[in-house]
Image (cartoon, grey):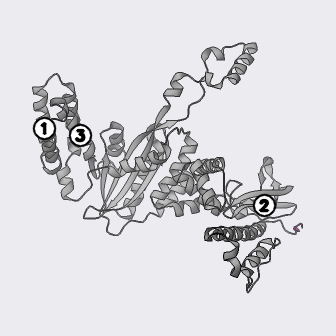
Amino acid sequence: MSLCLSNPIQIKNNEPLEEINEFINNIKSITQRYQSFEQIEQDIKMLMNKLESAILTESLEQYDIHTKVIIKDGKLYRHVLREEKTYFACAGKITVERSLYRGPEGTNICPLELQAGIIESAWTPSAARSAYYVTAQLSPYQGENLFKELGRFTPSKSSLDRLSRKIGVQWDSKHDEFFNRLSSEISIPEDAVCISASFDGIMLPMKTKKVIKEEDNKAKPEETEKIANKDKENKKSTETKEEKSKPLYKEAACAAVCFYNDKGERLSTIRFGRMPEAKKKTLKNELSETIEQILTQKSDLTLVKLADGARDNWRYLGDTLRPGEGEEVLDFFHASEHLNKAVEAAYTKGSPKCISHFKKYRSLLKHDESGVAKVIRNLRYLHNKFPKRKLILTELNYFKNNRRRMKYAQMAAKNYPIGSGVTEASCKTLVTQRLKCSGMRWDIAGGQGVLTARSLIQSKRFEAGWSLLAQSYTGEISLPENVVLLK
């Protein structure tokens, strides 16, 4: 028996087909030639990879243009070089010969890469998609080992890291365009009656720049070389003890938009994650534009704004995000934490009286329509009883300042959410699980590449997001009239 196709594949490299035919022709003696079925599986996979690689190579060559001049975006480009280039493909590395062209202002383009949509001049679209998805879930080191185990293509951890970083930069360079496209395609569940908008921050370890001492900046030219040589001899000498023991932490931000039905069940969630940025500007814009898009489609949805008691949160949620509209709710879990702090300040932590007192007023806060008023009265009583315990007064003011956002019983009666647990979970699943592993340090570009992918995946928008990304790497090429292709 041999491999037989109605329309035989015509490929230059017949070796894969010959090896497959040899394997098939000797199939009856396969158990004698192999010690285990696992070895058979591995050999079959290897043969298929060889065949796939050969087919991909010749398919990719069809996207090349070999002529003296081409046109892109109305500009003329002239042929300058023809050489082989190796790309990552799902079947392994493939090598093709392609032409390069130079245009106005010395810009170079490769028609093969533009027409085939090669990602970052190194990856076929399918291979890049798989690699980007994996780096969203695993560190480059873990991703490298995973690909080795799967036995298809085996990119190095440095290649995976570069890809994730560059795709993140590509996404942000077209952020507004991509974000608007995704927002216009948001699917609102038919039985949704309520949406919640919430966001929170999480501290993230960042890479620090080398500290240059002020006296080094003032060094004379002849002393500069001595300083440089000293640094080469002992690189660690340029790091201060503070750099080693206390990494720089900055606040990344996460947000979530959730849909709920009339029973209070969460139907779907859209998540957002951004690296540290002044005033969380990009994240707030994403959240605002998403809410606007949703309420434009379905204006009868009730908007619930959820967050902890941080002032910046409510300056945005109350004053910027549809001011005067919707329900403002301070996360019940955070309110409970503040109540517990006040009770522990009054009574011994862990004592029966402390525990029972906290449970009583926590229940009132959640289930009694006058619960927040009763909590405030009780905290005022505890403050008068223990006037020197300043924490009680601090927590009393916390409840007084946020009492209008603590109507938990009224909200629960309408089956509206009273907790920002989804956002807390977003901080954990988007950031902590991937970006806060032991020893990790991040810069903005590297971290944002990961967060963008994780946000798309967890919002079930990776397919749509990748389609936009892949399309951004393509370009149309045309030929001037009467131009002859070279062989």
**From which residue to which does the magenta span run?**
482-487
Q: Assign the N terminus to one quadrant of the image.
A: bottom right
Return the residue at label 3: 402
Tell which of 449 and 258 is nearer to you: 449
55 sits left or right of 143 in the view: right
Residue at the image position 41 percent from the left and 47 percent from the top: 428
The amino acid type of the residue labelled 1 equals: Pro
79 sits left or right of 370 in the view: right
Question: Which type of secondary structure does the marked residue at label 3 adopt?
Answer: helix
Question: Which type of secondary structure does the marked residue at label 1 adopt?
Answer: helix
- How far across and how far down the image is residue 173, in percent? 60, 49
28 sits left or right of 355 in the view: right
- How far across and how far down the image is residue 141, in percent? 59, 48
- The reply to whether the C-beta atoms of the residues labelled 1 and 2 are less than 8 Å apart is no
Q: Earlier in the sequence, mark 1 or mark 3?
A: 1
Q: Which mark is residue 95?
A: 2
